[in-house]
Amino acid sequence: MKFALKILPKPEVLDTQGRAVQTTLSTHGFNELKDCHVGKYIVLEVEAADESKGLEMAKAMAEKGLYNPLIEKYEVEAL
Amino acid sequence: MKFALKILPKPEVLDTQGRAVQTTLSTHGFNELKDCHVGKYIVLEVEAADESKGLEMAKAMAEKGLYNPLIEKYEVEAL
Amino acid sequence: MNLEEKLKLYRINPKEYEKIKEILGREPEGVEWAVFSALWSEHCSYKSSKVHLKKLFSESERVLQSFGENAGIVDLGEEEKVAFKMESHNHPSFIEPYQGAATGVGGILRDIFTMGARPIALANYLCFGEPEAPRMKELVDGVVRGIGGYGNCVGVPNLSGQTNFHKSYNENILVNAMAVGLFTEGDPICLSQAQGVGNLVVYVGAKTGRDGVHGASMASESFDEDSESKRPTVQIGDPFYEKLLIESCLEVMKKDLVVAIQDMGAAGLTSSSFEMADKGSVGLTLHLDKVPLRDETMEPEEILLSESQERMLLICEPSRFDELKSVFEHWGLDAVSVGEVIEEPVIRLIWKNETLTEMSPKDVVDNAPQYERDYNPWKRKDNKNLKWASQDSENLEDLKKILSSHQGGTKEWIYRQYDQRVGASTARDCQSPIGVSALPSGRGLGIVLGCRPHIMRQDAWVGGMDSIAYPAIELAAKGFEALATTDCLNFGNPEKPEVMSEFVASLDGMNKACEAFVTPIISGNVSFYNETLDKGISPTPSTGLVGLRPDLKNMPESFFTKEGESLLVVQLGEGVSTGYWSEIKKGSGEINFDEDLKTLSLQTNKLMNAVLDLPVSSTRIVSSFGLAYTLAKMCFEKDLGVEVETDAPAFLEPLYQVVVSTSNEKAWMDWAGEQGLKVEKIGRVCQNKQWKWNETSLSLDELKDCYNGSWQKALPGL
Amino acid sequence: MSRVGILRFPGTNCDRDIWKSIEMKNKKPEWLWYEDSFKPENYDAFLVPGGFSYGDYLRSGALAALSPAMDSLKKADSLGKPIFGICNGFQILCEAGLLPGALMRNDKGRFIDQWVNLKLENESGWSPFEVGNSYRMPMAHADGRYFIGEEGLKSLKDNQQIWLTYEKNPNGSVSDIAGVMNEKRNVVGMMPHPDRALFDWMGSLDGLKFFDWKDEA
Ligand SMILES: Nc1ncnc2c1ncn2[C@@H]1O[C@H](COP(=O)(O)OP(=O)(O)O)[C@@H](O)[C@H]1O
Ligand SMILES: [Mg+2]
């Protein structure tokens, strides 16, 4: 069973990568780009009895240290 | 309009981050984790006439350099 | 909110509140609370330490700028000058180790280039708890990654460091960073006095966010309690932005476009604007609504207190503003005029055409409270019985235990993660006891850190003295003359007399040594309240010294380079400590030090000259674990062994001795006779891979494995 | 005197080191700013220095590869001009497609600063030219693991495009690769720093041998 964690910097936290990507792309021909945030995409393949168990597990892994709650937020998604 | 790029290392490329996450998690007792891949999650906020135009733009940005086809693959998603 | 709650939230005590009312002639209102809270904080006002810092030895012929500016400056002659300073980022690093340490590096670099100097070197002084303490592995990893992440990216080499482990740091780690900047011919020194009525106040760099806004300051009536997003936000450092800021700021200074400049550090815009105005005896208008914001919903109080990184405030003549702006634009940065210098000595805070308040910077800055905290006179411990003599209890096999311990083992894991050569001027890196940067004039600039917490625990006065003497001797052993000092005084709660007593005693020890060695303290920082649940840290007045050497030729190595060379020990002073090993083994230690510092300094100076004049291949100060350990470390690099015959103790710690290896023993012995110094031959360097001490012989390969394996053993997985 | 264009991006931090290296070889260095196009005909050779262009954000070298100066550099390549990228400069040249392959995070996931010994595998348009010789210099990078797919590697080998290899692989690079060249051999890139091995006091002089090129030598 596969799950994806989408991890992004919290909105109030400075997103240094997002800032650099946004300014660079918008000056190089993509001025339609208004905002950009760069985070992590983690695919976890877990062995679980059912989807809800798997989801729980994925969350537990995230909480164990795959994201930093002081500066990041995350969502889980079943793939 | 917001779009997300999900970028992952190509299967033939050694995913050192994925490997590191897996080792850490399994030392923490998450034996159910069978495989793990770490990539990027990029949220783009673009000004576009409609969704299909926006999607096109997001793809164009990806192709312009947000991913490196030699080592990565990506998917776009409208948010 | 009643008054009591408010005072608590803004961390202002009742007496201070009375003083504020006296100053204002009324009760404080609105943002005034935040301004007093910030500027009267321990961090900004030095209220517990100022009376003692005033006593510090801080001048010499070479000192161009001492306390009072962003960093001190020393004249090196030949049109070269250096600015340097050290600062703590202990608490933020404990909360978020990567960002805490990274922003610590960013902050200290800004202090340096604000003065007009190009940063050329970094050094870091770290204290961690026991490896098995909760979160410790994560803290070590995060701090080291953070320092490397920032320093490497911004392109300033890390040349030196020191790392200590002790249980007193389990819940209060220390992260102190030092930066050194260079002025070459024609580089102006820029100061922070606002001047020139009608000049513009210009905001440069990153946009302001809610980063680091004090919990205390969040309490103003204007905020609703429930708002999650208004909680203090972790400050994020962007070394890439900092690099742009360095280049652009140095360029505008060189083009003479700035009248005054100041970085926005602790308490952000508030402290920078009030201090600039105060120093220049002028006033400023500040249109807070013109400050570039990351989040448009920010309120004036948050803008005033934000500690967003990579921002500067500068004063510029209106006619030069366009030129200034275009330099920043070239580097991709915004420069925005947010106010004006006015004659009336007040800070006028304006928000959408409405004056929020007018406050006199003199009243707030100069009238900040100062406390003479209680302390007791220091009683030096009398340990006259402790002698420099071989101990019955010594077991030479313990050398393996020392080398395999995290305290005595390699720190390579740390400095491999630091770029030590960017800038192409590194002559000695972190592997050497002192870092050396090659100056354009061809001379060498030595950088070294001091303060050994185990000595502090034995005697705070001697520990303070040692924070200067030990690094000064390390410099001399490579032929460098110590020129000046910066410090970072990390202590527990100053309201406790026992902590304050240690503070005063160690400062006195430092000061006496600075006078004797003529290494004035020209910049620094005090970090109190390193305490959790009533448990404070070992007193840790870390120091950074810079030294100068006339050339880079024949600089001694710190390891043996040639077989057959004689091993000599040069004695400077007669002090003795039971050393670090005794503390680890028995939990405590003793020290006997009763030296005439003037003599110690003279002897050190003689050693420096000898290193420059006499044939010498390697030198190394005998360190915390004693002679046996020091010799072993000198063997590793080239796999050369030693044969030692001596009746010296193996693990006691001398204050002080220096090991010298030379092909010309006679020259050194003659010198010792002439100069009246004690030099003893203890053995020779040999080809076979044995560490031999009298009858005991240990395999060098085994010792090396102990040393190199120590890190993984203590912190597996890192 | 040969004119050497040195590219500068926001975040480049070995630019002044390269300037020094070029001057030591009695050549004339000139800055080329990333935002500005330039005329390749006016220069004899080009250097892309190390550093952290754009903070290494997204991928090392990726954002720099998008800048106008890189379009001019591609023209320079089409004219066969010698181009040399060091460290971040190597990453930029790969991201821009001027060199094959990609540089990924070191296998242990950490920045590594250490001395390395390199072996010259094949001759390129850039010095040194003594195939088989070994050179000692520092490296300092987080993203230096050279990667190229199987086919790519085969063609690198077949065309003798592997320029330098590590004596002892520090970062997990495929086939110990420390530097490569393009098919025409005018473009080269390497991760270690010859610009940090120029004087005795630096610990090695080997770096001095890396700042000449064929049409001049
Ligand atoms: N935090 C650090 N950053 C950089 N270098 C460090 C750090 N900690 C220790 N080092 C370096 O590691 C080497 C060994 O340190 P240490 O074991 O304390 O021995 P020494 O007695 O030589 O200082 C020293 O040369 C020191 O400069
Ligand atoms: Mg040391």
Image (tube, coloured by chain):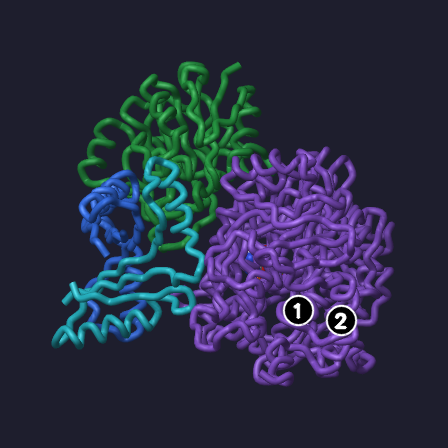
Chain colours: A cyan, B blue, C purple, D green
The residue identified by callout 1 is: C32
Q: Amino acid at mark 1?
A: Glu
Q: From the viewer's side, name the closer residue of C641 and D139.
A: D139
Q: Tell me what residue is drawn at x 53 percent, y 23 percent.
A: D29
Question: Element type at marker 2?
Answer: helix
Q: Position of residue C138 (x, y in %)?
A: 44, 68
**Mark 2 Cα within 10 Å, few/some/many (few <14, many 20+)?**
some
Instruction: Decide if residue C646 is on the left or right side of residue C125.
Output: right
Q: Tell me what residue is drawn at x 52 percent, y 56 percent.
A: C208
Q: Tell me what residue is drawn at x 39 percent, y 25 percent.
A: D83
In the rendered view of the protein, which quadrant contains the C terminus of chain C? Answer: bottom left
Q: Chain of mark 2?
A: C
Q: Indicate which disc residue D15 carries.
A: none
Q: From what the image shows, is residue C411 above or below residue D103?
A: below
Q: Position of residue C590 (x, y in %)?
A: 71, 78
- Residues at discs 2 and 1 in contact (Cβ within 8 Å): yes
The residue identified by callout 2 is: C24
Q: Chain of mark 1?
A: C
Residue most extreme to the left: A50
Q: From what the image shows, is residue D162 above or below residue B26?
A: above
Quadrant of the rendered image holding ligand 1: bottom right
